Image: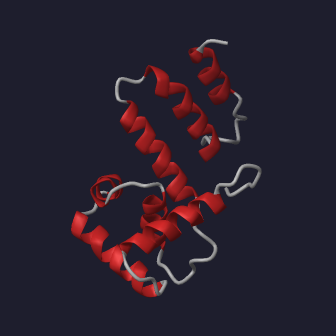
Amino acid sequence: MQLKDKITHLVSNRSAAEHHLSADEILDILQLLKPISKNKALIEKCILLLHAFGQVPKSNSKLTKRENQVFNLIGTGLSSKDIAELLQISSETVGTHRKNIIKKLELTGTGNLQKIAFQQNNIETCPGENTR
């Protein structure tokens, strides 16, 4: 099946009552577009953003919604600059969120923050688990 046919199939499979694509369907379309995109980095960032907004770590209820989003993006390995760009906030605001997360989770240093965020993302996105 050609790329155009695959995307058409995904979109046209919607019933009349379902006006919006699910996050999984959007991710499928982005994955299909990635190989032919002129800006593969942008597609990757969109995929990471969808993952970040689609899940809130269960064990971090101490964090605000935005802190959870930043936490998830830290766990994907993105820099503060990339996180700021994706969330359309300043790098300084990302830094403030990082400090607040470290304080709320009682961590010592940014290295531990990155380690815990990475581990949490990998736990939340284990194959076979339905996190959305």
Q: Residue at x 29, y 53 (%)?
A: 85
- Whether residue 97 sits left or right of residue 55 in the image: it is left
- Whether residue 43 sits left or right of residue 29 in the image: it is left
Residue 50, relative to residue 116: is it above or below? above
Q: Residue at x 58, y 17 (%)?
A: 3
Residue 61 falls in image quadrant: bottom right
Residue 15, relative to residue 108: is it above or below? above
Residue 73 falls in image quadrant: bottom left
Q: Residue at x 45, y 83 (%)?
A: 107
Q: Which residue is drawn at 29% across and 76% down?
A: 96
x, y percentage for residue 41?
37, 36
x, y percentage for residue 90?
23, 63
Residue 128, relative to residue 70: is it above or below? above
x, y percentage for residue 114?
44, 66
Q: Is residue 4 something one can see in this rendering? A: yes
Residue 101, relative to residue 17: is it above or below? below
Seen as rendered, the residue at the extreme top is 2
